[in-house]
Image (cartoon, rainbow, N blue to C red):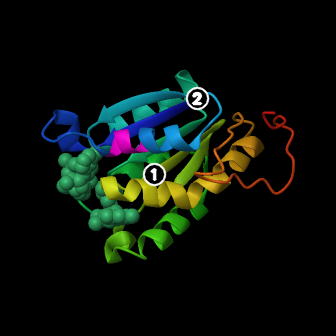
Amino acid sequence: MRIGIVTISDRASRGIYEDLSGPAIAAWLETAIRSPWIPDRRIIPDGVAPVRDTLIDLADTAGAGLVFTTGGTGPALRDLTPEAMAMVITREMPGFGEMMRRVSAETVPTAILSRQTAGIRGRCLIVNLPGKPAAIAVCLAAIFPAIPYCLDLMEAGRIETDPAVVESFRPVPTKAGSPIP
Ligand SMILES: Nc1ncnc2c1ncn2[C@@H]1O[C@H](COP(=O)(O)OP(=O)(O)OP(=O)(O)O)[C@@H](O)[C@H]1O
Ligand SMILES: Nc1nc2c(c(=O)[nH]1)N[C@H]1C(S)=C(S)[C@@H](COP(=O)(O)O)O[C@H]1N2
C-alpha cells in the first residue's frame, strides 16, 4: 500500500517554516498501521493547479491507495484544496469531513472553518486534514477506524492496524482479502 502524504502550504513549501504537519501524519501512520506500506511525501504550495496535479499523479501514476493532504482547507483566499478536490475525485465521501469537524469542534471553535472533505478517484481514497499540526492526531484518530473497511470495499488494498493504537472496524468480511494471520 502506497500512502501519499501531501503538505499544502505556501510558506512550508518555500522553507519559510518547517513542515510539521506532513511528518506528524507519517509518524501517526507509523504507529497505527502494522501491514506493509510505503509513504510518498510531497510538499506543495496552495492553489488549485499544484494540488490537482499532485493528487492525480499520486492516484493515477504513483498508484497510491490512500492519500492524506494537510492544509488549504480554510476560508483564506489561497485556501483552495477543496476546489482542487472537486476536480480530482469522482465520488465524494462527506462523512469524513463531518466527523473531523465534529471531533475538532470539541477543542477549537474554529473547526467549522475547515472545508475538509474526502473522496475517491479510481482505487484511491483522498482525505483532507487541516494545516495545523495539532489537528493531525485528532482527525486521524477519529476517522481511521473506518478507513480499512473503506479501502476493502474500494478494492484499493488491505490495511491492518495495531489495535492498541486504532481498532479497524470491519462490519462484514469483504472479498478484498483475509486478515493477516
Ligand atoms: N505544514 C505545516 N507545518 C507547520 N505549521 C503549519 C503547517 N501548516 C500550517 N501551519 C501552522 O498553522 C497556521 C495556520 O495554517 P494555514 O494553513 O492557515 O496557514 P496559512 O496562513 O494559510 O499560510 P501557509 O499556506 O503559508 O502555511 C500557520 O500559520 C502555521 O503556523
Ligand atoms: N482539530 C483541529 N481542527 C482545525 C483547527 C485546529 O487547530 N485543530 N484549526 C481550524 C482553523 S483555525 C482553520 S482556518 C481550518 C482550516 O485550516 P487550513 O486552511 O490550514 O486547512 O481548520 C480548522 N480545523
From where the camera sits, is residue 19 visible?
A: yes
1 or 2: tag closer to the N-terminus: 2
Mark 1–mark 2 distance (CA, rounded to whole Å) = 19 Å
Question: Could you tell me which secondary element the residue under label 1 belongs to?
Answer: strand
Based on the picture, tell me whether residue 132 belongs to the magenta stretch. no
Q: Nearer the viewer, residue 168 or 104?
A: 168
Question: Could you tell me which residue is drawn at 42 percent across and 44 percent down?
Answer: 25
Q: Taking 139 as reference, is 51 above or below it?
A: above
- Residue 126 point in image, percent of width and height: 53, 44
Point out the frontmost of discs 1 and 2: 2
The residue indicated by pointer 2 is 37
Question: Could you tell me which residue is drawn at 30 percent across and 56 percent down?
Answer: 132
- Residue 44 point in image, percent of width and height: 30, 35
From where the camera sits, is residue 78 visible?
A: no
Give the magenta-colored segment's residue range.
21-25
Q: Amino acid at mark 1?
A: Asn
Left or right, 97 with reference to 104: right
